[in-house]
Amino acid sequence: MKVVISDFPSVAIPERMDESVEIKHWLAIGAFEFYPLLTNPQESFSRKDLKRYGIKEGWIDSQGIEKAQKKGAKVFLIETTSPQLRLFKYINGRIGNKSNFYLVSKIISEKAQEVTLITDGSCSYAVWLNGDKQIEVRGKHNLNKAGDRFTNISLKEGENLLFIKISRGTNKKSWDLICAITSLRESERIFRVNYAGDFVVNPIVNKSLEVYAGPFLKGSVEIVDEHGVIITVTSFENHNTNAQPFVISGLDRLKEGFYTVILIVGDEKIRQIIYKGDYEKFVKSIKKNVDKQADNSLYTNDLRVACQRVDYLNNRPGDPGSPSETRYLNRNRVFWAYSLHEMLQKNAATQLMTYENQKGELGVFIFHKDSKLAQNCPLVIIIPSSLQGSSMIEDWYTGNLDQIETDNTLSDEYGMAVVWIYAGGKHYSSAQTEKEITAVINRLHSVIDTQRVFITGDCEGGRRALVQLAVSPGRYAACVAASPITLSGGNDGIPINLIDKMGNIPIMIRHGREDDVSPVENSRRFFAEAQKMNLQVEYTEVAGSHVNIRKDGHRYIFEYFSQIIIQK
């Protein structure tokens, strides 16, 4: 079908923005083919595919659209309910020789205003506004954050043209884009959430340290040693770190070891642990310290699995073609190495812990508890969604640091400890999960209140949490299921068929109306059935899809559990 300029999708930006405006409708051109024998797929992003139609990258008008269609380019409209655009859905036939898409949207602003464009894409993308390039990102294989780059832009009153080029390179798993516009104030808040613990570009440092400050153009950076002594303070002003990170030099004089970097922006401070020095040397040294633990106590087992995690990350090959993946790997290396370092001192807040199953095999889970919490604190058990691995030590789940650290912060704020269980990974079963939860609670019984144990999960994890509630309703003080799948399931059961087994335990469900992964009908029907039985089920339906640009989307879960504690 022929597409004309009047078909252009548009997004309205109000004069006063109270929340982010997600861009879900696009005019798409592509995907364009290339010859792999002549072009390295990783370099296909550099191809200017529109040039053959006399169209310059960054801008297009009605004549350009018509010209491209007449010459055989595929031009079509995309309308989604989710801000996460999955471009693999729009490819027919072989994908091996296709790499570049061009995406266009009209932004209609009620007034001339300064806003922030929040983007995340894979593998490489560039963004133009009204013909001017705003940002270019290369070699990002996954959308780890959903809200990754923060670019301050100037909208003119009326119509603005947003133009994006996105390439998958050699990426066969993710060819995705997320794009939203928000106020400067809201973008700063999102940055502080999403980049807590992750603003240092090179977390394993030698001579210099690089900082990404998102929408902030000024701020200061402190480096603090393990004794709390400030080593250096450096300020930046009018520095756009999207174009170039803020660099702090002269760190070769520092002793090897862990340091805390504090980014001060506005009235807020966010922190990250880095390692200065020869990381390989450190891993060898800490492995020797763990090897000295000769007994078979649970604490020693904890140290051994934590060491295995550090060793696994240390031996993983990096990706020299992807600065983003290198940073992600190094951040994991530092986080889990610091955890092991603190475990040896018996000071770790977040750590791997073990239990012994009935076969005498070790199970592994993640435990977080703020040292300021009392010994008998409440416990939140987080049930994972579908995992594809067979080992907690090596699985992606242990490397999902953004969510882990954000939930850690929330648990500290609300005075709770948190456990992430593995639930058997790809060998999941409700029976196995029940045994694991029992073993975890037994292991932690001396530091938690077993009468205040809560359970939660997202999507498939929400389904599994509801199933576990049906298995042992007397164990839990309350359950929260976020966008759960309730109308289908495996041999372990379908939640809507298990309602009568869930006791009268308080349940809270929240679901996005535009969820394209777990349709909202799952929660609507579950809630309707629960009402018929007069159960304590609270249901909230919200605008939005399965994707949350902010990483603190679990706040309502901790708020709900906190209310249950107060009521009791």
Image: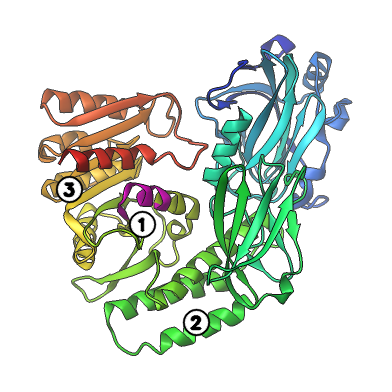
**Which is more foreground, mark 1 or mark 3?**
3
- Whether residue 164 appears in magenta in the rendering, the answer is no
Q: Which amino acid does label 3 sit on?
A: Tyr
Give the residue at mark 1.
Answer: 426
The residue beneath circle 2 is 286
Q: Nearer the viewer, residue 413 or 554?
A: 413
Kindly identify the residue that appears in the image at 73 percent across and 74 percent down: 252
Q: Give the range drawn in magenta.
A: 408-417
The x and y percentages for residue 57 are: 82, 31
**Quadrant location of residue 437?**
bottom left
The residue drawn where x is 40% and y is 68% is: 348
Is there a contact, CB below 8 Å, between mark 2 and mark 3?
no
**Kind of residue at disc 2:** Ile
Could you say whether the residue bearing mark 3 is in a helix, strand or loop? Answer: loop
Badge 1 element: helix
Q: Residue at x 11, y 37 (%)?
A: 504
Residue 86 seen in render: no
Residue closest to the far front:
229
Q: Can residue 409 be found in the magenta stretch?
A: yes
Q: In this view, does 19 lie to the left or right of 350?
A: right
State the quadrant of the N terminus. Answer: top right
